[in-house]
Amino acid sequence: MDFELSDEHRMLADLARRFVDDELLPLERAVLAREASTGRAELMPDEREHLDRRAHALGLWGLDAPAEMGGFDLPVTAMIGVDEALGRTVTPYELPPDSPNLRMLLETADADQRRDYLEPYARGQTVSAIAISEPGAGSDPAALITRARRDGDRWVLDGRKIWTSRAESADWTIVMAVTDKARGVRGGISAFLVDGGTPGFVIERRIPMIGGHSTYEIRLEDCRIPAGKLLGEEGFGFKPMQARLSCRRVQIAAWCIGRAERALEMMCEHAAQRHTFGVALAERQTVQNWVADAVTRIHAARLMTYEAAARIDRGEEARSQVSMIKVFATEMAWDVIDQAMQLFGGMGMTKELPLQQMAAQTRLARIYEGPSEVHRWVIARERLSCGAERAA
Ligand SMILES: Cc1cc2nc3c(=O)[nH]c(=O)nc-3n(C[C@H](O)[C@H](O)[C@H](O)COP(=O)(O)OP(=O)(O)OC[C@H]3O[C@@H](n4cnc5c(N)ncnc54)[C@H](O)[C@@H]3O)c2cc1C
């Protein structure tokens, strides 16, 4: 396996790093103050417009979108350096378009949907959400009960979705619904495109989460959408949805590596200059162990993430590898950030430093896109079934 990044991918990662240093880090103080006072870690519209303009001007736009839609068609491996850079800051900005829904649409959209949804999305002109989770179905999306039934030239959606990120600002939301209860995940769950503001698509409430994040609860009540809003083949929405999740999980691992790197840098700087009992904190064995373990685990997480991404790029099975990095990188970052907070003492507990915000973002990532326990289950199940086959 080649561990060298191509010059092109390295230059892209450097460019993303400069964008973060020059544009996102200077906004951090304002984002932290906003979260401390309003409970919402967000950008103001003028800040977002400025960042969009800068990202566009620098060519950090449409990175993994198809070339015929103005993008650069970059593979998942190339995106890791970019996402690592973005993970270094708590300023909430993702370079448009957000990759997972892009990949799901690339796999499923028909000609009309490409024109109406995929192309404007790939050009970064629209915002999207996905509504899978329900009050009774989160870790186990196969248990979802939102129904979609055909009524003439329309689909009629009824049910309830919860924890949907970006639902309020999304131009359209991918809604997963049961179209054939008897077939379940084997041909009975479909994906639909629902435009914001469609009658019967009701955003019932914003749910404040830790770290100033928000999700939304949605009620679908006699929500009628044209037949052409079915995304992909009827009954087979589950597989492209899983592919979408894999893409996000690689992204999460890269964000976590970036966050852990930043916490480690803060730790090393502080440990060198802070003295207690006449000795620099860097001289303490405990602190040295924290640093050594962080360096080692970050390195391991990065290698694992590149390997999982390379498998995805080659079109190979990567389910276990993706589960491994989801668990390993989120838990690694959580530990490193926690130790950095410990090292900073009282300062580490304040809302003035980004550490607590980095911790909250990492804590959320241990739940969304599948809790750690479910991913461990996936990894173990695969290995145990190999054992069972050998035993038989
Ligand atoms: C910040 C955030 C953003 C989100 N955004 C979205 C979104 O945009 N769209 C969307 O559809 N959903 C979203 N979600 C929902 C998220 O995907 C679910 O919360 C997650 O899948 C867990 O489902 P649940 O909350 O129903 O927990 P449950 O399924 O009730 O699980 C609770 C706990 O039980 C344990 N557990 C469950 N199954 C197993 C198992 N097999 N083995 C061992 N332990 C197990 C785990 O510890 C788990 O944390 C978001 C969640 C968060 C926190």
Image: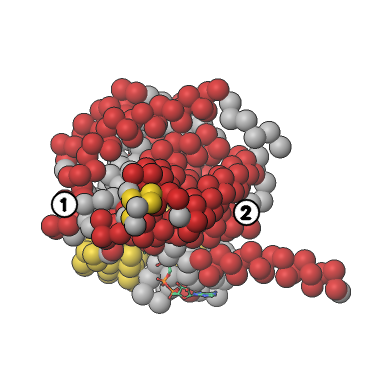
Quadrant of ligand 1 in image: bottom left
Q: Residue tagged by mark 1?
A: 34
* Residue 148, percent from left and from top: 40, 66
Residue 347 at x, y percent in the picture:
25, 56
Residue 316 in the image, given as x and y percentages of width and height: 67, 46
- Which of the marked residues, 1 or 2, is nearer the chain's N terminus? 1
| Badge number at residue 321 | 2
> Is residue 101 at all visible to an observer of this figure?
no
Which of the two discs, 1 and 2, sits closer to the camera? 1
Relative to residue 22, is residue 107 depicted above or below?
below
Q: Amino acid at mark 1?
A: Arg
Residue name at image x 71 percent, y 37 percent: 1
Specify whether residue 353 is in view: yes
- Looking at this rendering, what residue extends furthest in the front direction? 278
Q: The residue tagged with tag 1: helix, strand or loop?
A: helix
Numbered mark located on residue 207 in the image: none
**14 and 222: which one is in front?**
14
* Residue under the image location 27 percent in, 32 percent down: 23
Q: In the picture, residue 93 is in which quadrant? A: top left
